Image (cartoon, grey):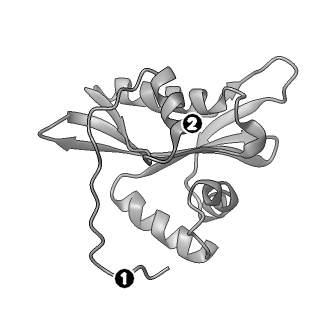
Amino acid sequence: MNQPLPLLEKGMPQIVLRHLEEDTELAASFAVMRELRPHLQDPAAYIVRLAHQQTQGYRLLAAWQDDAIVGLAGYRLQDNLLYDRFIYVDDLVVTASQQRSGLGERLLQAVRQRAVDLQCRHLVLDTGLHMALAQRFYFRQGLLARGMHFVEPLLQDRT
């Protein structure tokens, strides 16, 4: 699934969805990912981290408008006893200029279709309790809150 998927909006330039594979493409995604993950500071470290995540099945789907990335969906295929086979969405972000354009929905739908193609039983993601707008978006997309995500930091943050 790496062929470009054109998305046309009335009066809008064409948007193409395509998985990022090369380091130069991954580097081009840094600024957009920082909108979601502002703690990321070093583009080179970001590429190293993505390369490591790719060894664990992480894929990064980018929405391109002209020569610029305007949205990202990072996800991975997983299996566990709770959800069986599922796709977990690690990252979903669109640039501020693309919010409310339908692009987030299109990215999520592309990942959802990938999950269906892989015969997954679920699509799973987490969002922060403080992100009310994101929660409303996910509810509108048909996702339901099924639990809480608990975290215990074990090491001091190195970033």
Q: Is residue 105 above or below residue 40?
A: above
Q: What element carries label 2?
A: helix
Residue at the far left: name it.
81
Q: What element carries label 1?
A: loop
Q: Of the two numbered discs 1 and 2 on the same chain, state the one appearing first in sequence.
A: 2
Q: Is residue 156 visible?
A: yes
Query: Residue 4 location, x and y as percent?
Result: 64, 34
Residue 31 figure quarter: bottom right
| Disc 2 residue crowd, few under 14, some 14–19, many 20+, Cα 10 Å | few
Residue 101 figure quarter: top right
Q: In this view, does 121 lie above or below 84?
A: above
For image coordinates 46% across by 48% down, the residue present is: 59
In the displayed structure, does residue 48 sit left or right of residue 83? right
**Frontmost residue, 64 versus 30:** 30
**Amino acid of disc 2:** Leu
For image coordinates 27% across by 32% down, the residue present is: 146
**Frontmost residue, 81 versus 14:** 81
According to the picture, the residue beneath numbered tag 1 turns out to be: 156
Residue 133, label in figure: 2
For image coordinates 29% across by 29% down, the residue present is: 122
**Amino acid of disc 1:** Gln
Residue at the far right: name it.
11
Residue at the far top: name it.
10
Q: Is residue 22 above or below residue 116?
A: below
For image coordinates 31% across by 80% down, the residue present is: 155
* Distance CA(mark 1)–CA(mark 2): 30 Å
Query: Residue 7 location, x and y as percent?
Result: 70, 25
